[in-house]
Amino acid sequence: MWQHAKPIPGRQGQIRWAYYVAAGVEGWMLTPLSAEARPGTRPKWSLSARLVGVDKFKMAQRPLLFVTQFGRGRSLWQIEAFRIEGDRLIATLGPREDY
């Protein structure tokens, strides 16, 4: 399933710290960091997104998660590193987790 991960576009999501919303996300794109994942591993991802409603205090806390609707449920990725350029978030994410 993960051997040939492709970029995934989306419309809405959230950056969360614990139960709190640190920022809203609109117009996001997830891109796998490597073209092919090694067997038995799950890929890490790069996130590019437009931020809305940013709470600077909550964005400074850890761990931060990117959460969005995915299929019938919600998926999350832990944010490993990020930078903000204007209203754009560029982040490195860990493997996807579903809940």
Image (tube, rainbow, N blue to C red):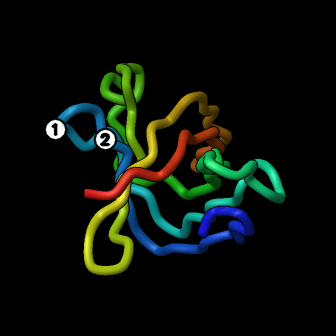
Q: Residue furthest front?
A: 40
Q: Where is residue 62 in the image (x, y as percent from the top left)?
A: 37, 21
* Residue at 35 percent of width and 20 percent of height: 61
Q: Where is residue 84 in the image (x, y as percent from the top left)?
A: 61, 37
The tag on residue 83 is: none
Q: What residue is shown with label 1?
A: 19
Q: Which amino acid does label 1 sit on?
A: Tyr
Q: What element carries label 1?
A: loop
* Residue at 38 percent of width and 40 percent of height: 65
Q: Position of residue 81 (x, y in %)?
A: 60, 28
Neighbor class of circle 2 (other Cα within 10 Å; few <14, some 14-19, many 20+) is: many
Q: What element carries label 2?
A: strand
Discs 2, 1 touching: Cβ within 8 Å? yes
Q: Where is residue 77 in the image (x, y as percent from the top left)?
A: 45, 46
Neighbor class of circle 1 (other Cα within 10 Å; few <14, some 14-19, many 20+) is: few
Q: In the shown orientation, is residue 3 left or right of residue 98?
A: right
> Can you say which quadrant of the picture contains the N terminus?
bottom right
